[in-house]
Image: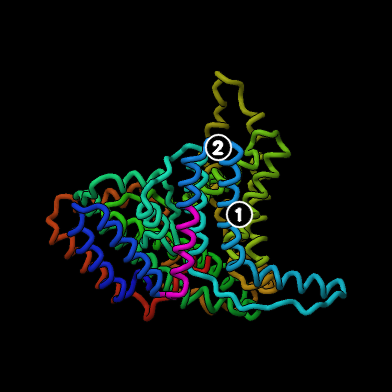
Amino acid sequence: MLFPTFEFGVFFLVVFAVGWELRRDPNWRKLFLVGASYFFYGWWDWRFVGLLVLSSAINFSAGWLLDRLGRPSMRKTVVALAVILNLSILGFFKYYGFFLDSLRVLLETLNLERDLPFMQVILPVGISFFTFQGISYVVDVYRGHVRASHSVLDVFLYISFFPQLVAGPIVRAADFLPQLDETPRLTRAMGAIGVVLIISGLIKKMVIANYLATELVDPVFFDPSVLGGADLLIGVYGYAVQIYCDFSGYSDIAIGVAALLGYKFSENFNQPYRASSLQDFWRRWHISLSTWLRDYLYIPLGGNRGGGFATYRNLFLTMFLGGLWHGAAWTFVFWGAFHGAALGIERFARQKLNALAPPAGEEPGYITRLSRPLNRVLGVIATFHLVCFAWIFFRAENFTLASTYVTGLADWSVPSLYVTPFIAALIAGSLCFQFTPPKLAEWLARPLEYAPSAVLGLVLGLGIFLIWAAAPAGVAPFIYFQF
């Protein structure tokens, strides 16, 4: 069940009406929302509802035990077992085929061919997201950042809540569970921002991302060997915009839907293509994942506490594993490794440049002050193109296709097939929106805070109708559903 479909519209209307009717009975409301979330997940494949139940049960039980055990050694054992179980489930469904295929290729290279056991494993949608939420809950209880919930309903709802269940954002227990202890309220501000975010997300996904996918990105990446540099360059620009609009569009809709049900989610994207460095990019792109990797991987590895080499190693390993999280393919591993290496080089260069800065208390020279705006502009351009280069490997199905794409960028002798005024305007206009005021959605929502509920409903309905009319036929799956 996709967000921008008639089925989801009917589903959400029922959930919205019944959910607010039950607002004075918290337990019945939570039970209803858990049931609705399982129905939402089961619409894709009912067989994997049991997997969602198992994941929730493991993490609730681990939290319950951590709350009752006093011995540090026992608590460490419980958290370790919970993390291992979570990662084992994720690893089996997501990486079984990848590791088996990699082992087969390695054995063939060594002339040690063997008949390996093969089993077709279906990747459950959203498994990476609800697994990471479960791990964050258990680890935060262990660290004392959040109290273990004594309510099965609360933990099951936290892990399965349908707006963010299949593609994030990854919500922290410390942010969500306290909201379940309060009587839900739909304030005017939440209603207004919810409507604006849903409309914004639908425009990004149904219009911009879908047009770019069908009219440019899919055909360009299908066979880059027959295309010239102009088409390949605008193709990777188009993919950069497509994946941003596709994923941030989902996040906008998820945050907006949650707001209409009375719950607040944190921002997941903050104009990433205006970043002037890769470090800045990762503070703006998929914020819930980048902060998760920082708090539960980079810092436990040692962060920047062990000196230069250890810091670069931890940075590289974090991004390497972050790439593997995105998909069971070596192209994703390369994408993560590239970002890890580039972040390390950037950090090293920044330290060297900082050493050349004027001493504390001394005014920088005129040339230095003059160069700062130019440096930022050059930083934005360089960062965007580094990110775009890495996107080629993220999008390509294999290294052969990616290398063909990269080498083809140098050949501008072939006439262009896909550089049209419409495509160029769509890409340029989308990138220009990266430089609008950061709180544009809140600014647009402010006038709606004073509108009656009927007007809000009319704005949402009219917005959906106009988007549906402007969008291309069909609804392409969200890119991040595969992760």
Residue 483 coordinates in the image, percent (x, y)? 53, 65
The residue positioned 59% from the left and 51% from the top of the image is 81
Disc 1 to disc 2, how far (Cα)?
Answer: 50 Å
Vertical relation: 215 (above or below) 257: below
**Residue linked to disc 2:** 371
Q: Nearer the viewer, residue 26 or 126?
A: 26
Q: Which residue lies most toward the right here? A: 111
Q: Nearer the viewer, residue 166 or 401?
A: 166
Examine the structure image and report whether residue 51 is included in the region drawn in magenta.
Answer: yes
Vertical relation: 358 (above or below) 110: above
Residue 252 image-quadrant placement: bottom left
Residue 403 coordinates in the image, percent (x, y)? 69, 69
Main secondary structure along the magenta-highlighted residues: helix
Three-letter residue code for mark 2: Ser
Q: Which residue lies most toward the top here? A: 361
Residue 81 placement, left or right of 127: right
Residue 182 placement, left or right of 360: left
Three-letter residue code for mark 1: Ile
The residue positioned 66% from the left and 74% from the top of the image is 401
Residue 88 coordinates in the image, percent (x, y)? 60, 60
| Dot 2 crowding, Cα within 10 Å, few <14, some 14–19, many 20+ | few
Q: Which mark is residue 84?
A: 1
Residue 76 appearing in the image: yes
Report the number of discs: 2
Vertical relation: 166 (above or below) 263: below
Closer to the N terminus: mark 1 or mark 2?
Answer: 1
Q: How is the image coloured?
A: rainbow
Residue 411 appearing in the image: no
Which segment is the magenta one?
A: 44-59
Which of discs 1 and 2 lies nearer the camera? The answer is 1
The residue positioned 37% from the left and 81% from the top of the image is 473
For the N terminus, the image quarter is: bottom left
